[in-house]
Image (cartoon, rainbow, N blue to C red):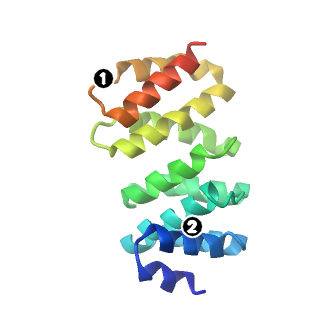
Amino acid sequence: MNIEQQLLVAHSRANGMLVANYASKNPKHIDLLIQLAKQEVVYQQRASQALAYAVEHLKFNLSTKQLNSIVALLKDENLHDAVHRGVLKVLDLQKSFPEESESFLFDYCITQILNPQRAIAIRAFSVPIAYKVVLKYPDLKNELIQILESLSPMEGPGINFRKKHYLALLKK
């Protein structure tokens, strides 16, 4: 399969899963999806979707190098929201993050949570990632509690659910 050509066939769950299934059999194909997530918007959306499917549904285990590469995607604000959403979804499925990325991830997630102009999904997916960093660095716990408590109840269901859920976990 030519992954680049296949991604152009359709933007659908079926095509994303087809690419994910093929890519998950070879780490080099996963690397290609990560690289394509930096290309034109059509590739950004579809490659990040396939990458998320590979990790979420096919249980592909990303290497530390691959994790660092996808974290680096978050640093590019010019990428489509689909890339940020897909990366956050992938990171949410990880038990831990590369140590060198933890500080950036916490800062990034806090910035997203507090930014009302950001897409709700990006803000919502940022909460569990910030929480996972707090589990390793409990000194950050009060900061995350204050940030979650400062969110308006009018934020929307995705954020309100995570706010309630993670505040309960943080206050145990």
Q: Which mark sits nearer the N-terminus, 1 or 2?
A: 2
Residue at the spot x=43%, y=38% of the render? 124
> Residue 34: percent from the left, percent from the top?
57, 67
Q: Classify residue 31 as left or right of residue 125.
A: right
Residue holding disc 1: 153
Q: Nearer the viewer, residue 102 or 33?
A: 33
- In the displayed structure, 10 sits above or below 134; it is below
Q: Amino acid at mark 1?
A: Pro
Q: Secondary structure at mark 1?
A: loop
The answer to which quarter of the image holds residue 54 is bottom right
Residue holding disc 2: 34
The answer to which quarter of the image holds residue 170 is top right
**1 vs 2, front mark:** 1
Q: Secondary structure at mark 2?
A: helix
Work out which quarter of the rendered image holds the C terminus and state it. Answer: top right
- In the displayed structure, 161 sits above or below 98; it is above
Q: Tags 1 and 2 in contact by the CB under 8 Å rule?
A: no
Q: 10 Å neighbourhood of mark 1: few (<14), some, or many (≥20)?
A: few
